[in-house]
Each structure stands twice: as structure tokens, then as C-alpha cells.
Image (cartoon, rainbow, N blue to C red):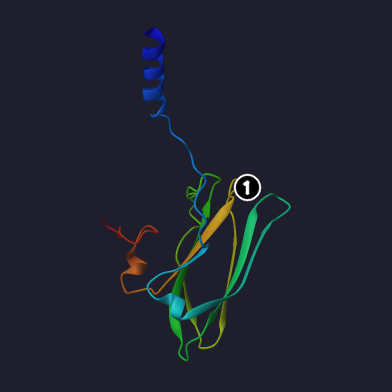
Amino acid sequence: MFKILMIFIVAIFSGCTTQYLPPPPMTNIIFLEGTDKKFKIVNEALARNSGGFMQVEVDLFNVNSYAGEVAYRVDWRDSNGFTIDTIMSRWIYVLVEPHREIHIKAIAPTPKATNYRIRVMNPNSYDKERVNSYRYQQKGQ
């Protein structure tokens, strides 16, 4: 009876442990708000420099026949898939001429970075007033 009770207790408590699963495979370049129809990925290169910092270079080509403003942001992630907070991760606004490329180059803020994500979006009039990367908190709130 004691063995059965112990097996039952162990079975209950073993279900409460946290298991970290590997993150699902994902695309490193995320096009938001229809920007995938405006830009195509021409080149994507990733390396680790001599100091142990990751660096990424991405070229996007504007397939439209008109110029437009685009915003992009590079977020670095650790081995668990969590975003590494840094003051260098901010939205960058660029005017891209028709049938021209935009070159994105970034270096990780720490050697602990193991992955990255680049988000590309169409900026609107409110975006430059935003405080954080998730586009929901504005200055003064």
C-alpha cells in the first residue's frame, strides 16, 4: 500500500515540473502589414565575429515602382528564445527608392545572443511617438 501511495505522489508532482522545449523553427525576417508584397529578401548572412558576437546582414529589394518609407527593427534572442533587451534595439525608419535595395546590418549586444529576428513594417503617423517595440505604449503614458 505504501509503494502505491508513493508512486501516486511521485506521479502527481512530476507533472508539475517545467520542461523547456526547443523553440519551434521560425523565420528570422518577419514582414508585418503587407510589407512582404513590397520587399523581397535578396541576401541574408549570419556570422559570429572574433569577439564572439553574432552579426547579421540582410538585403531587401523594393519591388514597387514608387518610393516608400519602411521601418525595421532587429531583436536578438538568447538560447532559450527570449528577447535580449537593449537600448540599441529600436525601430529605424528608411525611405527606399523604387527598385532599390536596403541593406540592414546589425551586431548583437552580447555574446549570449544565439538568434535574431528582423521585423519590417509600414510606419504610420503614430509610430514615431511610441516608446517600445511592441507598438502599444506611447510617450506620456
Graded by Cα atoms within 10 Å as few (under 14), some (14 to 19) or many (20 or more), the crowding at tag 1 reads some
- When the figure is inspected, residue 109 is found, relative to residue 135, above or below; the finding is above
Is residue 8 found left or right of 112 in the rendered image?
left
Residue displayed at 70% across by 55% down = 49
Q: Quadrant of the N terminus?
A: top left
Q: Which percent across, then down, holds residue 30?
A: 47, 66
Q: Which percent across, then down, holds residue 90?
A: 46, 61
Is residue 130 found left or right of 23 in the rendered image?
left
Q: Which percent across, then down, holds residue 63?
A: 51, 85
Residue nearest the observer in this picture, 56 or 89: 56
Question: Would you name the residue on which mark 1 appears?
Answer: 111
Is residue 67 found left or right of 45 in the rendered image?
left
The mark total stands at: 1
Residue displayed at 56% across by 85% down = 100
Residue displayed at 41% across by 17% down = 7
Disc 1 is placed on an element classified as loop
- At label 1, the amino acid type is Pro
Q: Quadrant of residue 36?
A: bottom left
- When the figure is inspected, residue 109 is found, relative to residue 127, above or below; the finding is above
Residue nearest the observer in this picture, 49 or 27: 27
Is residue 59 found left or right of 120 in the rendered image?
right
Farthest right residue in view: 50
Q: Quadrant of residue 133?
A: bottom left
- When the figure is inspected, residue 77 is found, relative to residue 32, above or below; the finding is above
Farthest top residue in view: 2
Q: Which percent across, then down, holds residue 3?
A: 41, 11
Q: Quadrant of residue 8?
A: top left
